[in-house]
Amino acid sequence: MTKEEFENIYRRHYAQMYRLARVMLYDPQESKDVVSEVFTRLLHAKQLPMENKVEGYLMTAVRNRCHDVNSHRSIRERVEKLFLQESMQNNMTTLDDDDRLERLMQFIEAELPPLSQQIFRLRFLREMSYEEVAHAIGVSKVTVYNHLSQSLQRIKEHFR
């Protein structure tokens, strides 16, 4: 593939690929990364799709990569939960479980905004998934993720 052919494909399909990634990921930077990865793979591909099938190939590649990213998010969420549980145990080993939970809940009620409190309780006390929390509150999964990330960071800093 010549440089001009590649640039032509890039200009013709980038916006559509980016929109698909944004719809699936809700994150502008991750969406750009996904589209860039797909174009990189196209650039290094040994066999290129036929000219009339390039759009379908690119859109399918973006969709598949977005599915991979979302799957890794789910794993990351589980790791964060385990990390929170472990860090809470390590930081408060001198207190019994009731005292630790009481201190945590007092901090959450005093220091976190109401939406963050609600998201935290649904996610960790009711053990709902990010998607279930988002649906219950009426916000996006990205909003749930962002609130939990910020809340966990504040909790870690406070109990350090």
Image (tube, rainbow, N blue to C red):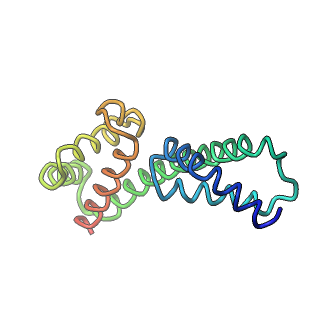
Of residue 137 and residue 156, the one placed in the foreground of this image is: 137
Residue 117 in the image: state x and y as whole percent.
22, 45
Residue 6 percent location from the top left of the image:
74, 61
- Residue for point 28% across, 45% down: 120
Q: Is residue 18 above or below residue 60?
A: below
Q: Is residue 160 left or right of residue 38?
A: left
Locate residue 133, reporting x and y percent: 35, 35
* Direction from residue 57 to residue 96 in the image, left or right: left
Quarter-of-image position of residue 34: bottom right
**Residue at position x 87%, y 54% from top?**
47
* Nearer the observer, 111 or 12: 12
- 12 vs 130, left or right, is right
Taking the view exactly as shown, the residue that stands out farthest to the left is 110
| Residue placed furthest toward the top | 136
- How many numbered marks are there? 0
Residue name at image x 18 percent, y 52 percent = 112
Farthest-out residue, bottom:
160
Please state the horizontal and vertical placement of residue 130, each as a whole percent of the image.
41, 40
The C terminus, quarter of image: bottom left
Front-lying residue, 12 or 63: 12
The residue at 33%/35% (across/down) is 126
Q: Where is the N terminus found, in terms of image quarters?
A: bottom right
Nearest the viewer among 109 and 66 is: 66
